[in-house]
Amino acid sequence: MTKLMLRALAGETLPTPPIWMMRQAGRYLPEYRATRAKAGDFLSLCYNPDLAAEVTLQPIRRYGFDAAILFADILLLPQALGADLWFVTGEGPRLSTISGPEDMRGLKGKDDIHEHLAPVYETVRILSRELPSETTLIGFAGAPWTVATYMIAGRSTPDQRPAHALREGDPRCFDVLMDLLTESTIEYLSMQIEAGAEVVKLFDSWAGSLKGAAFAKYALEPAKRIISALKERHPGIPIIAFPREAGEGYVGFAKATGADCLAIDNSVSATWAAEHLQGDSCIQGNLASRHMVTGGQDLIDETRAIVEALKNGPHIFNLGHGITPDADPENVQLMIDTVRGV
Ligand code: 1CP
């Protein structure tokens, strides 16, 4: 029998939706914290295939999720392109910045990334050997706009202002960067698929700050280019798109880009998604992450409401965004039991 996750991605309506969770390998798990300490720091963990595979497997062993997501980060690609990358404890990522064409000259080309990313491909190979036969392996990359926001500002930004400033102030330079990211994301995901990823997901975490024509040009178009290139090279590969907080931009996004599944955040309701989105593709989502901290009857009620709302079409249960480090591992079990009706 084919894996549940792949059946939902192929458009099948299932009696119980498959389930996995964004950031399922992460700091809320004591076993993750222990392995990370062994690796030394976050980036060393990402580039150590044995340990990265180990943390990917931890939530599968503990909970039996239907899918495992490769342990890596969207910022490894900019690093492979030549950007400096480091993490400041308690604060987050820092990168060298891009403020104009002179900063682009230091970057490598789309075909020069693989040596740097070889440990990631090795992690995928280990996982495709070691995962249980019913578990689907997801590879991923950041979408060009989201990755560009970090490369331009050199860090996380609440409103992506530096990226918008470059986009408006020097559109030629910005477009060169977007093209490089689009092309290298195709190469990166293609190698993950060749190494054994059975699905790939494109994270556009900051898509919500693009509006109107800018959303079409910098969120939808690059996703369409990446998805059509991947489908041409790897016919049948299922792809999940996550233009987070796209709001009305979610409507028609799967159809226009060719994505098999649209992942939604919790700023839209599951009933709205069932009506306006599920006719085009499988829907993934969308329980608010805070329930993993607060638990209780609210978690149960909200989980049931989402399953109920999306039961008449293909659905993959997930959170609306990543689980946070202060979550209680027992609430994750409660969510899974509620979805599976045990
Ligand atoms: O201290 C730690 O251990 C680091 C925390 C952490 C983790 C667990 C980071 C730093 N990245 C990851 C792993 C990760 N990141 C995965 C694989 C593991 C899994 O999901 O189980 C994935 C898919 C990502 C994707 C990612 N990284 C995104 C897109 C999804 C999202 O959350 O919106 C983004 C924006 C990043 C950048 C990043 N990396 C790490 C942090 C703290 C951030 C976010 C910075 C910010 O707030 O802007």
Image (tube, rainbow, N blue to C red):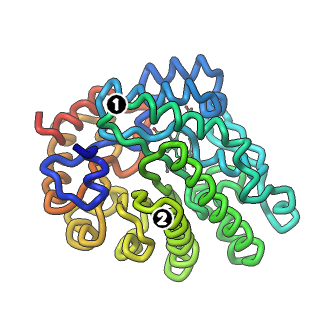
Dot 2 falls on a residue whose secondary structure is: helix
Q: Secondary structure at mark 1?
A: loop
Of the pair 226 and 301, the residue shown nearer to us: 226
Q: Nearer the viewer, residue 60 or 287?
A: 60
Image coords of residue 251 (percent x, y): 35, 75
State the CA–CA distance, disc 2 to disc 1: 26 Å
Residue 110 visible somewhere in the drawing = yes
**Which quarter of the image is occupied by the C terminus?**
top left
Q: Give the position of the N terminus as an image quadrant.
A: top left
- Label 1 crowd (10 A; few <14 / some 14-19 / many >=20): some
**Which residue is at the front of the view, 292 or 221?**
221
Kind of residue sitting beneath label 2: Lys
Q: Earlier in the sequence, mark 2 or mark 1?
A: 1
Residue at image point 65% right, 42% down: 93
- Residue that badge 1 annotates: 132
Q: Residue at x 59, y 60 (%)?
A: 186
Residue 246, labelled with which disc?
A: none
Amino acid type for the residue under numbered disc 1: Pro
The residue indicated by pointer 2 is: 231
Number of dots carrying numbers: 2
Instruction: Estimate how packed mark 2 is, as few (under 14), some (14 to 19) or many (20 or more) residues with alpha carbons within 10 Å.
Output: some
Residue 182 image offset from top left, x and y in percent: 63, 65
Question: Going by the image, does 258 lie left or right of 268?
Answer: right
User: Is residue 248 visible to the viewer in this orientation of the structure?
Assistant: no
Q: Residue at x 41, y 25 (%)?
A: 58
